[in-house]
Every structure is written in C-alpha cells, then in structure tokens.
Image (tube, rainbow, N blue to C red):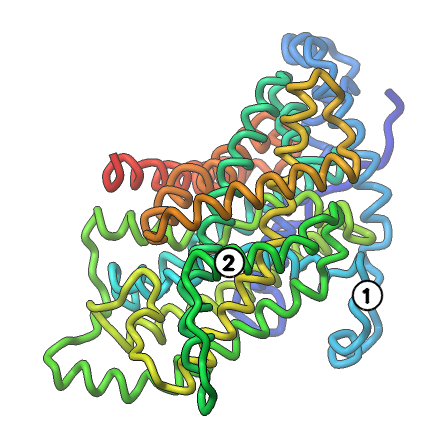
Amino acid sequence: MASNAPLLAPPAESWGCSGPGGGCIDVKRWFIGVITPDFNTAEARERCLSLDQVDESLVQAAQKPRLAEATRTMMRECQELNAEKSMRDSRSLTTRCCAPLEPDSVRSCSSALAATALGAGALALPYAFSLTGIGLGLVTLTFAGLVSSLSLQILMVAARYTNTQSYSAVLELSVGSRLASLALDLVVLANGVGSVVCILIFEGDFLPPVLAKPPGLEGVEVARSVAVAAAALAAWPLTLSANISALRYVAVAVPIALLATILIVLYDAPGLHHELREAGDRVVWWHFEPRKWLQAVVIMVNAFANHMNAIPCVNQLGKPSISRIVKATVNGNLLVWALLSALGVGGYVSWASATKGDFLLNYPEGRPEIWFCRLMLALIVYLVLPVALLPTAKSGAQLLLAAAGASRSEVGPNVHRFSATLLLAFCTFVAIKVSNVASVIGLLGGLLASSLMFWFPAVVYRLLLWPTQPQIFRGPVLGAIVLFGTLGWTSVAINYI
C-alpha cells in the first residue's frame, strides 16, 4: 500500500491546560487528544498491511481483511475530513446561536443527542440524589456524563470514518459476525420499547391532573389509560419519518421546555426546604451505601442514554471532523448534565428523603406553578417520544427484514412506518398496564442502557479502533467504559434479581 501522510494524534501538550485558563483542563481539547486516530503507530500500520517486514501480527491482520480495509478507510476519511480542521467559523457566538438550525449543523446534532437523553429518565434524577446525597450525586453524574461522551465519540468516529450506516453494522464490522448485529438490534429494540413505555407512563401521570384542574378553568376528568392512548396517537405522525434531522426543531424544544420546569422547581425549593426542615427531615450531602449508590448510578447512566441515535446524528453532521464530533457530543452531554444537575438537586432539596421516583407526585394539587410544570413535562415527554422511537423502529425493521430473509442494509420508508406504528401500539398497551416507572428505569439503565452505552462501545473500541488510539489513553478509556458497564449490570444483580 502506498504511504500517505497519516493523521497524527494531537501533541501531548494539547491534552491539558495550555489555554488561557492557566491550570484548567480544556475538556474538548482533551477529548480530541484522546479520540483522534494515530495511523503512524506500528500496530496501525500492521493493521493496514503497510509495513515491509512481515511478522506474526501481519499474518493475523491478513486473516481479518475486513479490519485491514476498515482501517485503511478510516485513514482516508481522517485525512479528508480533518484536512481543514484549522479553519474556524468567523461568525460570532451570538450570530451562530441565532442562525437558522441547519440539518447538518453541530447544534442540530447536539440537540438531537440531548433530546434523546432528556426523556423519562430525567424525571427520576431527584430520587437518585435522594439515594446518594448532593455531593456524591453530582460526582457520580459528572463521571457518568464524561464516560458517556467517550463512548459516544467511539461510536461516532467508528461509524463515520468507516462509512458505516448503523450501530449494528459497526458492531458486525468489529466482531465479524452477523449474530452480533442481530443481538444489538434486539437490545436496541428492548431498550427503546422500555424507554417509550416509560415516556407513556409519565404522560399517564401528567395529563390527567393537567386536564382536571387547569387554573381558573373548569377541568375535564380523563382516565389514565385514555391519556396514554391519546398521547401516543398525537405523537404517531411524528414517528413516521426515518430521518432524525426532520425532528431537529422538536429536539430543540425539549431542553427549552425542561428549563422552564427547572426554574419553577428551583423557585419553589427554598420554601419547601424550610418546611421539611421544620418537619425534622434534612438534606444529606454525602451518603454512600453500595446498594443505593448502584441504584442511583443506573438512573444517572440512563439519563445520558442517547447512543441509539449517535450514528444517525453523525451521518447527518456536515464536515464531521474529530473536533466537530467532539464539540457535538460534549455540547449535548454538557447541556444534559446542567439540566439534570439543576433538576436533581432542586427536586431533592425540596423533598429530601420523601422524594418519589416521579418527584412531581410529591407536589400537592392546586398549585398553579406545579400545574404548569406538569404541562411542560407532558410536552417534553411528548416531544421526546418520536426521537426515542426512531432508532427502535429502525432496529425493529431490520429484525423484520432479517426474519423475512431480506437484506437488512436498506430499511425503506414503508417498512419503517410499519415498524414504528407496530411498536408504538405495543408500547401503548404496556404503558396502560404498567405504572411503576422507577423499576422500569432501573432495569433499563442497569442492563440494556449499560450494554448500549458501555459494553458494545468497549467491543468496538478494542477490536476496531484500538491500534489507532493513543497508547497512553487506551487502557484508561477502555477501563472506564468497562467499569460503568460493570456497575450497571451489578446494580441489576443486586437490586432486581
């Protein structure tokens, strides 16, 4: 193979604190240093079959031509997509923020990732903080967000730089077995069904009180089952598109609506906190009990679960250089972290040890601001539903095609619509029958979300990206991802089995 000028990982000094902050770590530059491929390493060159000397490693690489070809494709894509990485957008921050939301922009990508995460799991964050205390909760949530960003970047770089179109195809490329992609589609399907069920359960919690007692108006009594079915029917038209960029304005509305809710929660928190202190309850700053901490971990992990839409997002991203991928993932997860921290701390400070799995159930009826909270949250979960169902419907469609003996590589619009409609109907039926959302979220975060967020990306990282990654970070990155995957599975074993 002809030698090309490979893309090198950034120099070590760019990983740390060489910026004007003086002593502060530039998180985005650090992530760029960690995830940028380096094709000058001996392992990468052996994988590409570009060394003159033939040794045992070359023989092993030759036995896996898919990995050799994938690595060569990554090298070509890295050179092309990062050739203009030094060029910066000269527009001001205000101009960029106020510009139209283009389908291939970083903002669209970040918004879609944030909206995917800000679903049903977000409303259980106050309960998670009640299990750990504020300090331990913030530390755990921060590490969950950082490791989630790493695994997101692994999937997005692996998919975009090998020209792979789906999560299951990336795993199949890494493992070399079609069974791997089928297994991943099954996990995505199960996780997505659970997420949509949680979303519809929340709609059943929010809509009846919203419609029953609107401030200053005569309300309408609506049964929980009717509210769940009506929400699903209203969201159904939005679930029919297979293109995530078509939902970009829906995705932007999610954090805005959640922010309105958070402001109300924070506004009420001082008064409620004073009342609970008078009643003898108190807020804990640090409480570590392994069983409760593991239960909190899976709730916090599930709150960052946006990996199902990672590959559709990166395939829509324009000029997907390493820096733009890092910017999209860090911005998206930073937004999620900020909103979840405020919501979790505000809700926990308000209700302390009495905080429920759906913390809004703690609030008494008849308060106008809480009515507005429930209205906003009903809107949030409605908007999140089509974003959460999109990858679920795609995996369901791919499994249907596989069962029919057809090619899984192309899911046509009609097959996607059928899959989305069938799954939405099934989730609606389950949500009508089930109401314990905390247990569902715990199982989702511990088993399925942990697999999608950590275990499968760990396999992709070790088998596909490993030879091109900076040696100093390989072990720590893989170790961090495996650690959180282990914590998720352990929580299920301890709390639910």
Is 151 left, or right, of 46 in this rendering? Answer: left
Q: Quadrant location of residue 247?
A: bottom right
Is 463 left, or right, of 264 in this rendering? Answer: right
Residue 439 appears in the rendering = yes
Q: Can you tell which mark lies on residue 88?
A: 1
Secondary structure state at the residue bearing disc 1: loop
Question: Which residue is nearer to you in this view: 240 or 395?
Answer: 240
Question: Which residue is nearer to you in this view: 379 or 83?
Answer: 379
State the image coordinates of residue 195 (x, y, percent, origin top left).
49, 48
Which residue occupies 38% across, 47% down?
433
Which residue occupies 63% across, 26% down?
399
Q: Quadrant location of residue 415?
A: top right
Task: Examine the rendered structure and indicate whether residue 366 appears above or below residue 490.
Answer: below
Q: Residues within 10 Å of mark 1 (few under 14, many from 20)?
A: few
Give the residue type at disc 2: Gly
Q: Quadrant of the C terminus?
A: top left
Question: Which residue is nearer to you in this view: 391 or 241?
Answer: 241
State the image coordinates of residue 115 (x, y, percent, origin top left).
59, 60
Q: Quadrant location of residue 142?
A: bottom left
State the image coordinates of residue 85 (x, y, percent, origin top left).
81, 55
Give the residue type at disc 1: Arg
- Circle 2 sits on which residue? 119
